């Protein structure tokens, strides 16, 4: 289990395939990351991904346990 306090604003979020998913806006309550709506991948909207998808946090990057395309298909608006 990751430590949510390691996740900070403006960190890049990438899928297990290394592809860009989004940029962290902030943690939203318990268990969700809110992605920035000004990220080119967002389509101008905020999206939410569960912390359960986070495999690791390293330097300035949040690594997910699923590929980017799958994460984008499953994120919540």
Image (cartoon, helix red, strand yellow):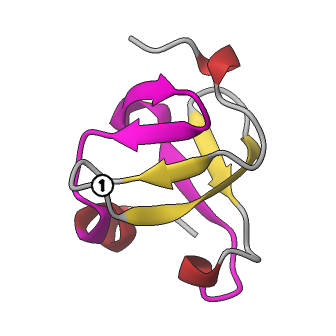
Residue at x 32%, y 73% (from the top left corner): 73
**In this figure, which residue is indicated by the disc labeled 1?**
18
* Residue shown at the point (58%, 70%) measured from the top left: 77
* Secondary-structure class at tag 1: loop
Image height of 58 relative to 24, above or below: above
Magenta stretch bounds: 43-69
Q: Is residue 7 left or right of residue 17?
A: right
Residue found 62% across the figure and 83% down from its top = 40
43 to 55, vertically: above or below: below
- The reply to whether the magenta stretch includes residue 63 is yes
Name the quadrant containing residue 17: bottom left
Residue 35 percent coordinates (x, y): 65, 58
Quadrant housing residue 54: top left
Total numbered labels: 1
Could you tell me which residue is drawn at 61 percent across and 43 percent down?
A: 33
* Residue 2 point in image, percent of width and height: 46, 15
């Amino acid at each position: 289990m990751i430590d949510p306090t390691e996740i900070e604003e403006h960190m890049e979020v990438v899928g297990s395939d290394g592809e860009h998913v989004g940029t962290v806006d902030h943690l939203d309550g318990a268990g969700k990351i809110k992605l920035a709506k000004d990220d080119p991948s967002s389509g101008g909207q905020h999206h939410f991904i569960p912390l359960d998808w986070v495999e690791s946090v390293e330097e300035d990057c949040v690594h997910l346990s699923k590929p980017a395309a799958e994460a984008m298909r499953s994120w919540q608006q």
